[in-house]
Each structure stands twice: as C-alpha cells, then as structure tokens.
Image (cartoon, grey):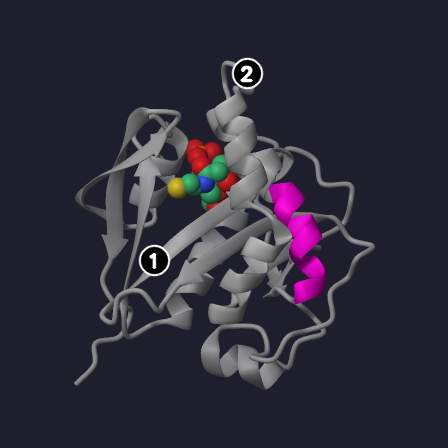
Amino acid sequence: MSSIRRAVAADLPRIAALARWVWLDTYASHGVTAAFAAYVEDAFRPETLARALAQDPMWVIEGPPDVVPPKPGARTDVKPNPRSRDDDIKAAGLPAAQALAPAPDLPLQAWAALDSHTEPGRVELTRLYVAPTCQGLGFGAALLRHARQAHSTRSLWLSAWEGNARALTFYRREGATQLGETWFELDGRRHRNEVLGWPPLETTT
Ligand SMILES: CC(C)(COP(=O)(O)OP(=O)(O)OC[C@H]1O[C@@H](n2cnc3c(N)ncnc32)[C@H](O)[C@@H]1OP(=O)(O)O)[C@@H](O)C(=O)NCCC(=O)NCCS
C-alpha cells in the first residue's frame, strides 16, 4: 500500500533522483542533449531542493517495490501514511503537520512541491512528478488534492508544456481551467507552456 507523507531532508537524494528520472522520461523523448543534462543536474541538486523545502512543505508517496502497471479499469488507492496522526488527517485532510520519519527501505514513487511565497494571493504547484512505472495509479491526483487542501483559501496554479498532452488532460480532468500561457527557455529555444489553475477550495470572508 502506498502512502503520502511530508518530505524531510533525508528524502532529498531520492527526490532528486526521482525528479531527474521523471523529467528526462517526460521531456527527453529524442535523447539527452547537453542542455537537458545540465538542466536536470542543476534544477534537482539536493541543495537546491533543500532551499525549496525550507520555504514550503513537499509531499512524497512511497510504497512497496512491487508496483505493477494498472490493468485497465483497476484502481489503486493511496492511503495517508499509517504512521501519521489520525486527528490531523481528519482535520486537514493531510498527514501530520510535523515531518514523519521517512522509510528509506521503500521506493519513492511520486513527489509534489509548492511555492506559496512568491505571490500573496496564489500558490504555484512547481513540481508534480510520478515515477514512470507508477503513473496512472492515482498518485498524481492524490498529491494534487493534497496541495489544494494545504492552501485551501488560495488559488493554485501551474504551468505545463503544451506538448505534455497527458499532463494537460490530467489537469483538465481534475478541473483546472486555462489562465494564460508562459514560455520556458532551454538551450536558446522557447517552449510554450499553458498556465492552468483552480480557485480556492474555500472562499475567505
Ligand atoms: C501528469 C502526472 C502528474 C499525472 O499523475 P498520475 O499519477 O499518472 O495520474 P493519475 O493516475 O492520478 O491520473 C491519471 C490517470 O489515471 C486515472 N486515475 C485517476 N485516479 C486513479 C486511481 N485512483 N486509480 C487508477 N487510475 C486512476 C485517471 O483517470 C487518468 O487516466 P488516464 O490514464 O487516461 O490519464 C504524471 O503522469 C507524471 O508525473 N507525468 C510526468 C511528469 C509530468 O508531466 N508532470 C507534470 C508537469 S506540469
């Protein structure tokens, strides 16, 4: 059974490796260019991730090593970490606010990161990465809902490359609407990203 919990510093080497794996699997469909190699090395350094973790919580899903691709129609439930406090989960829909012990014996399967400091009115979902072998199991949806609950009075937004059809379909299925566009530059080339978002889960008075 896979479970969601808040990431701790000890997770960062595994998060970095997972992020590089997912990023290359998603974007390096024609092979790994020097620019791609430089990007993944720099963007996912554990020390870079540690700075982000100091600003905002991150969440991970870890689980048994025998995850198999889902059969058509099969559903895999993602449960809150059984070591978290039930009251916190019921109150906030989240694992315990304080960091739980990581389980280094379990494979890390998915990761989500936020930026809640750059803009006062809204929160950016900066990363949502599910291991290629674990996609389609509901992990992305579970982490996305977690992120929305964590800042339920603020809107959530993200940018997704226009060529990432699966992610765009996934976000729209989760209720996102298009807010605009932005451009990601890599190796002198500009890549159009769609900006998508959700309103706050709760309205403030
Ligand atoms: C896009 C991404 C985050 C979606 O996460 P995911 O875990 O694969 O998505 P989910 O399983 O939650 O939902 C996707 C699919 O599973 C289905 N699904 C949703 N909940 C499910 C569940 N509990 N059990 C089984 N299937 C489920 C959805 O209907 C959807 O169907 P699809 O196969 O037709 O797309 C993931 O594929 C990913 O990490 N991709 C690579 C990196 C990336 O593109 N990140 C986003 C950058 S902006």
Position above or below: 74 against 9: above
Residue name at image x 28 percent, y 50 percent: 175
Left or right of 162 on screen, residue 143: right
Q: Nearer the viewer, residue 156 or 175?
A: 156
Q: Nearer the viewer, residue 132 or 194?
A: 194
Q: Position of residue 181 (x, y in %)?
A: 19, 39
SS class, disc 2: loop
Q: Main secondary structure of the magenta part?
A: helix
Q: Quadrant of residue 130?
A: top right
Classed neighbour count for the residue bearing mark 1: other residues with Cα under 10 Å, few (<14), some (14–19), many (≥20): some
Q: Is residue 52 magenta?
A: no
SS class, disc 1: strand
Mark 1 and mark 2 in contact? Answer it, CB < 8 Å.
no
Residue name at image x 26 percent, y 66 percent: 119
**Residue farthest toward the right in the current orientation of the protein:** 105
The residue to which callout 2 is attached is 31
Position above or below: 135 against 103: above
The residue to which callout 1 is attached is 124
Left or right of 85 on screen, residue 170: left
Q: Quadrant of residue 190?
A: top left
